[in-house]
Image (spheres, rainbow, N blue to C red):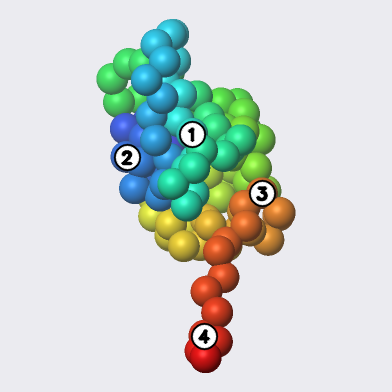
Amino acid sequence: MIVKSKKLESSLRSKGFERSQKTGSHRLYIYCYDGRETDIRTFLSHGSDYDISDRILSYIKKQLYLDSTQQVAELANCPLTKEGLASLYESKGLIKRNKISNYQN
C-alpha cells in the first residue's frame, strides 16, 4: 500500500491533529479533541512528498493507536472521517465525548 507523506500530513490536520511548534528533525502532530491536546501523537519526517515505507506505517499505526496499517492508509486517503476517528478513539477509551443532554426544565 502506498501512502504519500503530504497526503497523510494534510489528512492529519483535517481530522483534528495540530502540528506542534516544537522544532526538531521531525514534525510532531498531536490529536486535539474538545480544544485539548491528547496523548495521541505521531511524527513525520521533513522532506518533500515521499512514499511512506511499510515499516514507518507500522510505527505510525502504533503511535496513532490504530489496529492496522490499512487504517493508516484509510486515514490518509479519507475513508476514515474525522467523526469516525473520534468514534474509534472513544471506543478504545482514549477520549471521552461530551454528551449533551436533552433534558429541559
For label 4, the SS is: loop
Work out whether residue 74 or residue 30 is closer to the camera in this orientation and state it: 30
Q: Position of residue 82 (x, y in %)?
A: 43, 57
The amino acid on which the numbered mark 4 sits, given as a three-letter code, is Asn
For label 2, the SS is: helix
Looking at the image, tell me whether mark 2 or mark 4 is earlier in sequence order: 2
User: Cα distance, mark 1 to mark 3?
Assistant: 13 Å
- At label 2, counting other C-alpha atoms closer than 10 Å, the crowd grade (few under 14, some 14-19, many 20 or more) is few
Q: On screen, 85 above or below 18?
A: below
The residue at the far bottom in this view is 105
Residue indicated by mark 3:
94
For label 3, the SS is: loop
User: Cα distance, mark 4 to mark 1?
Assistant: 32 Å
Mark whose residue sits in front, 2 or 4: 4
Looking at the image, tell me whether mark 4 or mark 1 is earlier in sequence order: 1
The residue at the far front in this view is 105
Looking at the image, tell me whether mark 1 or mark 3 is earlier in sequence order: 1
The amino acid on which the numbered mark 3 sits, given as a three-letter code, is Leu
The amino acid on which the numbered mark 1 sits, given as a three-letter code, is Ile
Q: Position of residue 29 (x, y in %)?
A: 45, 30
Residue indicated by mark 4:
102
User: Cα distance, mark 2 to mark 1?
Assistant: 13 Å
Q: Is residue 5 left or right of residue 64?
A: left
User: Cα distance, mark 2 to mark 4?
Assistant: 36 Å
User: Dots 2 and 1: beta carbons under 8 Å?
Assistant: no
Count the numbered circles shown. Answer: 4
Looking at the image, tell me whether mark 3 or mark 4 is earlier in sequence order: 3
The structure residue drawn at horizontal position 49% and vertical position 34%, both measured from the top left corner, is 30
